[in-house]
Image (cartoon, rainbow, N blue to C red):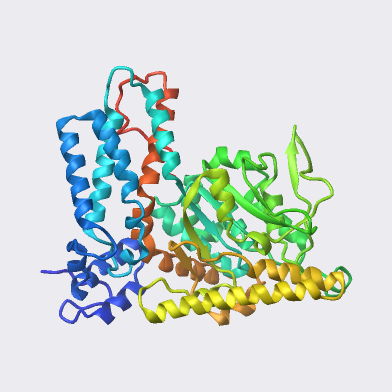
Amino acid sequence: MRRALPGTSPRRSSLPALDRAMGNAGTYREWHEIAVEHDRLSGAEDWRADDDCEWIHAGELRATIARLRRMRRRGETWTLLEAFQDALFRHQGECAQPELYQVARAGTKRVIGEYLDELETCFAYLLALDEPGVDDRYRLAQVKRIGRVYGRPALMLSGGALLGLFHFGVVKALFEQDLLPRTVSGSSMGSIIAAWTCTHSDDELRALFADPSQINREALHRLPLRTMRDEVTVMDQAKMRQFLLSVLGNQTFSEALKHSRRILNITVSPLRKHQVPRLLNYLSAPEALVNSAVLASCAVPVAFKPVQLMARRRGRVEPWMKNELWIDGSVHRDLPFDSLRQMLNINHFIVSQTNPHVVPLLSLYDTRPGLAAALARDGSNIYQHGSAQLLDILRKHAPGSSLRGQLDKAHAVYNQTYAETDMHIRMPFRPLLYPRMLTNPSLEEFRSYTRMGEMETWPRISMIRDRTRLSRMFGNAIGALLDRQKSPAARPGARSRGRSPRKAG
């Protein structure tokens, strides 16, 4: 007898009832069970089992699977290595089509899962072979080479003031499914969540997710009215600095990497017109203090004063770059796609977007097929690009440097890419939340934002898992091989499976 799903009846299960049940699910496992039932009832499960599809060449995928399996079973090692690399990139584009994840709730075509399964099996087979002249140093070099070409995933967290607490739920959902990328970037409020994620170990994150009441939420304090008038600033930056120190500690970017084994990236925007925006991480600013970078990335004009970045060099805290001040990272580079590609070989982007001026636009930006969705996407793009062009004209002809400077910042905000990736987790447009954007959240509000982030992430878990699966496979193998080389008991021909892998991605 079929077990009743939460919120449904075994005799009266219907698609609307299952939709409601998914909205009330307490965990991803529960949500997924309901999604599977929804696919069975809607017919989407039949679609998953049928190879016929306009977005993929299913026949070629089946032939690739059969060829790899045949070579592996016959022990054709070097031929298999060439075929593996060919298969890895031959089908990469078609298996990444976003439309493949918009039919069924619980996943996509079964043939794609079988293709990924066979690639993983072949990789494990090749990695475990004990051939003459093949040692762990050779294996590591080959895995790094192939993995570098394939690329790595990153999680990008936008700005959004209090709305950015949504990111906490996104990070929690990915962490619990072992899908949290090793590389995390953040701007403004997103920089707080990114830095929090990358300055804590897995065990520390697990404890804080279990009891969020431990987390300090007292970040925002308004200045007295007289001080606001004198300083032309609304918020108390000293209190914000104390909050960041209590939550993030006093680690540098390189120290945060050693502690969490995650790569933190924070964007900051220059105050001076002729400086350039920066992406701070362990490569570009290893000695910079994380709390100082976050303070700068959160320095929204008018709300906070510009910030001088600080670094710890030879045990002394001093300015990271003298005579330069920095402001909100969202102004010029909310989502640093290009910088992450160039610096860290990132080409799989998971984006969590909460910026208040972007969320309403992205509510129209739907990746589903069809004329209505296409018109909505085009309308959203026309509005954003038109606004950027109008602001460009105004800033070039504005009287006075002060007004021109403000229009420069507004143009920079609208002249960015906010929807380059289909692995996009967007906060729902909730206008009633906007008036409280610069207030401290109650524990109940914190839990509500977390829940919202989880609920928006769960429907994208299957896509994220598939799209990052091979990147995580390479990352785990590199970590295992490095750990094995450090072990005094390591044997050149030892198998890598069964070892504790490093963090994926």
**Foreground pick, 25 / 386:** 386
On the rendered structure, is 9 left or right of 288? left
Estimate the x, y position of residue 202 in percent, counting from the top left: 47, 46
**Farthest residue, direction left:** 1
The residue under the point 35% across, 21% down is 135
On the rendered structure, is 173 left or right of 262? left
Tell me if I can see residue 174 in this picture: yes
Estimate the x, y position of residue 280 in percent, counting from the top left: 65, 48
Q: Quadrant of residue 73?
A: top left
On the rendered structure, is 211 left or right of 408? left
Q: Quadrant of the C terminus?
A: top left
The residue under the point 41% across, 18% down is 488
The residue under the point 43% across, 53% down is 175
Above or below, comparing residue 361 to residue 418 in the picture: below
Q: Quadrant of the N terminus?
A: bottom left
Q: Quadrant of residue 399?
A: bottom right
Above or below, comparing residue 434 to residue 83 in the picture: below
Q: Quadrant of residue 139?
A: top left
Tell me if I can see residue 222 in this picture: no
Total marks drawn? 0
The residue under the point 68% across, 64% down is 331
Estimate the x, y position of residue 499 in percent, counting from the top left: 34, 32
**Foreground pick, 217 / 495:** 495
Estimate the x, y position of residue 469 in percent, counting from the top left: 35, 49
